[in-house]
Amino acid sequence: MTILVTGGAGYIGSHMIHALIDAGEAVIVLDNLSAGFKWAIPVGVPLMVGETGDQALVARLIAEQEVSAIIHFAASIVVPDSVADPLGYYRNNTVNSRALIECAVKGGVKHFIFSSTAAVYGNPAKVPISEDDPVAPMSPYGSSKLMTEIMLRDAGLAHGLDYVILRYFNVAGADPQLRTGQSTRGATHLIKVAVETALGKRAKMDVFGTDYPTPDGTCIRDYIHVADLVQAHCDALAYLRSGGRSVTLNCGYGRGFSVLDVIDAVKRASGVDFRVDRGGPRPGDPVQIVAQAERARELLGWRPQFDDLVTIVTHALAWERKLGTLQN
């Protein structure tokens, strides 16, 4: 039986493909290549270029490839862009996901793993945040993901589709073997931007907001290594295959670092004191997001291996250096 991975040519999706192939799974990728790269997919893994909202295409893939599980990464993910283009985000993240879920139900897919986000929590009243805390997205991005969560839960109850919803905190780093990493040009991820600046790919970087109610005035986030996040997906698939009940889980480490903490870590790891400009806050950015993630460890048996900011930054730097040779 085959696993269909949507967005498998992207940052997290390509790491997922490598992990599945390493585990001996049969995989097919569906990606429109708007943010992904063909070269990020391991040789021999079939790629179908198309949209998750193309139900005729998805239905054919499910039937022809005997798809038993879907891991759904494909989405637009930039919070400020979602504020500027909410309808585009609702179309790509919500409408297309609805179409994909319907195809899964009609095609008899047994298991569905959904890439959600801590943005569904908005600006939480307390940290760390548990899966049972109120959801109140501050951006169309967060709302678009929450809408998909609701649809998936309802479809699961009505049609017996078993699922795991994983709410990501801030994903960073790269494959320790440097087979893939964050490669999007103009990416907005903080660690990606910082390592690009350290390596001279950007003249400077900006800090958005310096008077938040935090120790140094900048936002605090829970950074999770992409390899550990992918392992959580592998554990989630094993959990569903063993008869586990549908569940929503946080994916983070349970401790936060400020924007200035991250910049300092990148400066120390790279040995470069690059330029940092300070400006006003961006719309849709919560003050502090830190996970309460014990439930994922308990239910899935998830055991992170790279829970260390220096390790995350070091892997990101190594990938950025390699990426420079790939793009030249």
Image (cartoon, rainbow, N blue to C red):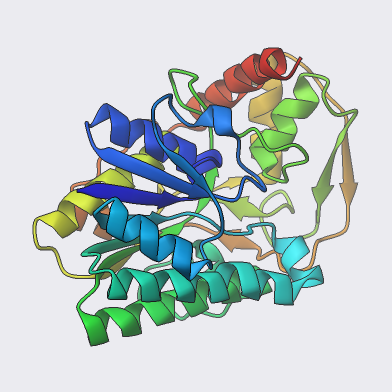
Name the residue located 9 percent from the left edge and 56 percent from the top edge: 242
Where does residue 250 sit, x and y in percent of width and height?
Answer: 38, 60
Could you say which quadrant of the image residue 132 lies in?
bottom left
| Image side of residue 298 versus residue 17, left or right | left
Question: Where's residue 160, x and y in %?
Answer: 19, 78
Q: Residue at x 27, y 44 (%)?
A: 234
Residue 193 in view, yes or no: yes
How far from the left and from the top, in percent, is residue 68? 23, 57
- For image coordinates 78% across by 70% down, the residue present is 85
The image shows residue 108 at horizontal and vertical percentages of 23, 69
Q: Answer yes or no: is residue 133 visible.
A: no
Total residue callouts: 0
Please say if 66 is above or below 27. Answer: below
160, above or below 130, in the image? below
Q: Is residue 59 left or right of residue 77?
A: left
The residue sitting at 39% across, 39% down in the picture is 16
Foreground residue, 110 or 265? 110
Residue furthest to the left in view is 242
Residue 273 position (above or below residue 149): above
